[in-house]
Amino acid sequence: MSSKLFSIFQIKSIILKNRIVISPMCQYSAKDGFANDWHLVHLGSRANGGASLIIQEATAVSPEARISPEDIGIWSDEHIEKLKNITHFITEHHCVPGIQLAHAGRKASVSSPWQGNRKLSKEEGGWETFAPSAIGYHDIENTTELDKTGIEKVILDFKKATKRAVQAGYKVLELHGAHGYLLHQFLSPLSNKRTDEYGGSFENRIRFTLEIVEAVQEEWPNDLPLFVRISATDWAEGGWNIEESIQLSEILKHKGVDLIDVSSGGLVSHQKIPAEPGYQVPFAEQIRKETKVCTGAVGLITEAKQAEAILQEEKADLIFFARESLRDPNLALTFARELGVDVQWPNQYDRAKK
């Protein structure tokens, strides 16, 4: 049986050499939104490591959209130059560069994990956060409800960021609608208590996400793939669920979204996640089978045979690796060896292949 993990996969004009995708992972290493050599080496090493597609960490569409002060941003034309260096290196090493555009909403203005992952005051360099409703992630936290003007600004920020992403050389665009960040906050009734056209019914709660999709499509080339990452469930009573995720995925497919990157959780602090190997894969499988849209599976997928089985059993189309790729930048080369697949190594590393 030939390996499906190392089979070619085409989405629109982009041909992926295998099904291994490096998932967006925050590095908390930027200053004023500017990428630097850490990001070049981090992402570049995984391109050398054999992955087919690398999606850059959650990249803020505005200063207030950042999770932390150290997040990468793309709200200024000045950010483009270094990002071009990164996409050029990735492309040069036979890998596709992707970017995840994001707005943290009420989960913004926190310190990096190694600085406590805590809410920052304005005196500490923090900023006012915005959400669909004035409900903080924690009860003690304050956030400001977005008014119509604020909603229009966020949509425009995503559109402008998309234009810069094109200029910077990215070939896959992913919108971050998961993990409790702003788009997810609008989707879930636990964080969205609005009574206008952006709250209440399912159709109203998905409106913000759909308007952002339409806005970015005005700038994103038709022949390049557009992904949306969702949390398939909030893992909390009364929250966003798999049934709504299936409905949204069907709508997104008809709107021209090419793949749903299926994660879960992150919206509320009282979530109860039954984490175990591959625990999110059933969501990717269900969305794929019921909507016929391509899906990406992510979450505690750590072994080559495990990833291969997910694809052979047609539970997903791509496998997204996060923490495992932090442990092993050469993940694809490692997996190829384990599965007995002959893949091309970088010329500089070839003498270590055998």
Image (tube, grey):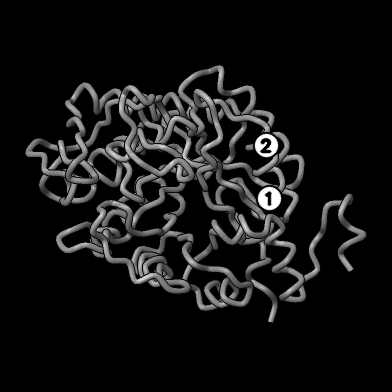
* Quadrant in which the C terminus is drawn: bottom right
Question: Where residue 118 sits in the image (x, y, percent)?
Answer: 35, 41
Name above or below for residue 347 compared with residue 243.
Answer: above
Q: Is residue 3 left or right of residue 147?
A: right
Q: Position of residue 246 (x, y in %)?
A: 30, 61
Task: Name the spot of residue 51 as percent of width and height, x first.
Answer: 67, 55
Taking the spot 18% from the left edge, 25% from the top edge, the residue there is: 148
Real-space Cα separation, disc 2 to disc 1, in angstroms: 10 Å
Taking the spot 64% from the left edge, 54% from the top edge, the residue there is: 16
Image quarter of residue 318: bottom right
Q: Which residue is mark 1?
A: 46
Residue sitting at the far left: 195
- Local secondary structure at mark 1: helix
Question: Badge 2: how crowded within 10 Å, few (<14), some, or many (20+)?
Answer: some
Vertical placement of residue 350 versus 276, above or below: above
**Total labels drawn:** 2
Taking depth in this image into account, of 120 and 304 the one nearest to the observer is 120
Q: Give the amino acid type for the residue marked by disc 1 in the picture.
A: Arg
Q: Pick out the residue farthest to the bottom.
A: 1
Residue at 24% x, 62% y: name it.
Answer: 241
In this rendering, is residue 1 above or below 48? Answer: below
Q: Secondary structure at mark 2?
A: helix
Q: Quadrant of residue 312?
A: bottom right
Residue nearest the observer in this picture, 12 or 158: 158
Asked where in the image residue 87 lies, by quadrant, the reply is top right
Q: Mark 2 or 1 closer to N-term? A: 2
Return the mark for residue 16. Answer: none
Q: Position of residue 71 (x, y in %)?
A: 48, 34
Residue placed under numbered mark 2 in the picture? 40
In the displayed structure, does residue 232 sit left or right of residue 75? left
Q: Amino acid at mark 2?
A: Leu
